[in-house]
Amino acid sequence: CGQCVAYCPTGALAIRNDVDKVYKAIEDGKYVIGMIAPAVRASLQEEFGLEDDVATSGRVVSLLKMIGFKKVFDVAFAADLVAYEEAHEFLERVEKGEKLPQFTSCCPGWVKFAEQYYPEYISHLSSVKSPQMALGAIIKKFYSREIGVDPKDIVLVSIMPCTAKKFEAEREEFEGNVDIVLTTRELVKVIKSTGIDIKMVDPEPFDRPYGLSSQSGLSFGKTGGVLGSVVNVINDKMSVKSVETKQLSEGVSLTTVELSNGKVVKGLAVFGLGNARKIVDALKNGEMEADVVEVMACNYGCIGGGGQPYPNDVRTRARRAKILKEVQSIDVLISPTENFHMHQLYEKYLEKPLSHASHEVIHTLYKHRKRVQEDEIDILPLPEETED
Ligand code: SF4
């Protein structure tokens, strides 16, 4: 059913193919803009015998331009922006002493789960949009003006590791931000349909200004990335004495940050909705404590997303995590705070984190959703059990 398709982060229940919509937009002469999520560049190689190629995203940028895309931006740019805003939101909550722990809201699978099963925690979800929706809003609202193109003539194509992102783009509160969402597997179809050998395509950089990202922004592609990025921003703002991360169980890790003023911030990074349920229940019952909690629905985060190529097993995800780390290591910027194009965006349009303009464009509110059927969550198959 439509609800299950929308809910399922693994893609097993997806019945749509949005590839034709992309070709139609190009044929219709629309101003087609692409944007690529961090996790996609860690898995696409598998389909083209490129294995550990760290230039895959650059090759995709070139290829998309060849078939008619006007610009291709990096979702990791928006990940920097989201981490920057989320860190400020967290510090404001600490100052006011309210709605803690703060939960991340980058993963639509988790957000929908929280809306359905834990309505009492909806106000704890970060109000910052996910990188996909934040970048979509910025392009449609600000970039369109800069290039002098009516937002109605822009078709924004987002390339993501899961079908939950298709559902996210269709949420009424994000209407018009992103037009078409392709999964990594659908991008594979696009590339194969061109007949171009991607191995032979010279890489080119993402377009500016939304093509620059830090190592933190790229780390959104795997578990712990959002939390680590928020910690990096806090470190830049307040000076941190020590950061220690330990694994509590499979899919749950605890990061303890000691600030130079002696205060301690506890952050949990959780993957898998089964783990999320356990952790939220433990927080609710007072059996656990945390100030900030990152939740990603898929195993090991977006690198294990259901829109990624098959196989999507433990060994494959470990290799993707390694490639993502290598891609990160060649990035000269470490923290979101160093992203000067992000600061330019604030100077030009958003003023400062949590400003009125920022709230208007890159923040949102979530709401209680009723479950369609009692056992909805239990029907989620693991990615390695799915078939295309
Ligand atoms: Fe999608 Fe990433 Fe969430 Fe999985 S963890 S549902 S890939 S956003």
Image: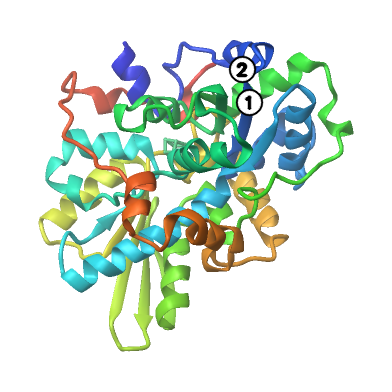
What amino acid is found at the position of numbered circle 2 in the picture?
Val
- Which quadrant holds residue 41? top right
Query: Which one is in front, 285 or 162?
Result: 162
Left or right of 263, for residue 311: right
What amino acid is found at the position of numbered circle 1 in the picture?
Val
Q: Is mark 2 within 8 Å of ligand 1?
A: no
Q: Would you say residue 48 is visible in this rendering?
A: no
Task: State the residue position of label 2.
Answer: 22
Colour theme: rainbow
Q: Is residue 378 above or below residue 135?
A: above
Query: Which one is in front, 31 or 303?
Result: 31
Query: Which one is in front, 69 or 267?
Result: 69
Q: Is mark 1 within 8 Å of ligand 1?
A: no
Residue 122 place in picture, x, y as percent? 19, 45
The residue depicted at 19 percent of the width and 36 percent of the height is 367
Query: Which one is in front, 142 or 372?
Result: 142
Secondary structure, mark 2, is: helix
* Marks 1 & 2, CB-CB < 8 Å contact: yes
Residue 199 place in picture, x, y as percent? 85, 33
Residue 90 place in picture, x, y as percent? 30, 64
Q: Is residue 379 above or below residue 193?
A: below
Q: Which quadrant does the N terminus fall into?
A: top left
The residue depicted at 26 percent of the width and 67 percent of the height is 92
Left or right of 130, for residue 115: left
Q: Is residue 385 above or below residue 61?
A: above
Q: CA distance from mark 1 to mark 2?
A: 8 Å
Task: State the residue position of label 1.
Answer: 32
For ligand 1, give the image quadrant: top left
Q: Is residue 31 above or below residue 16?
A: below
The residue depicted at 61 percent of the width and 48 percent of the height is 210
Q: Would you say residue 84 is visible in this rendering?
A: yes
- Badge 1: how crowded within 10 Å, few (<14), some, or many (20+)? many
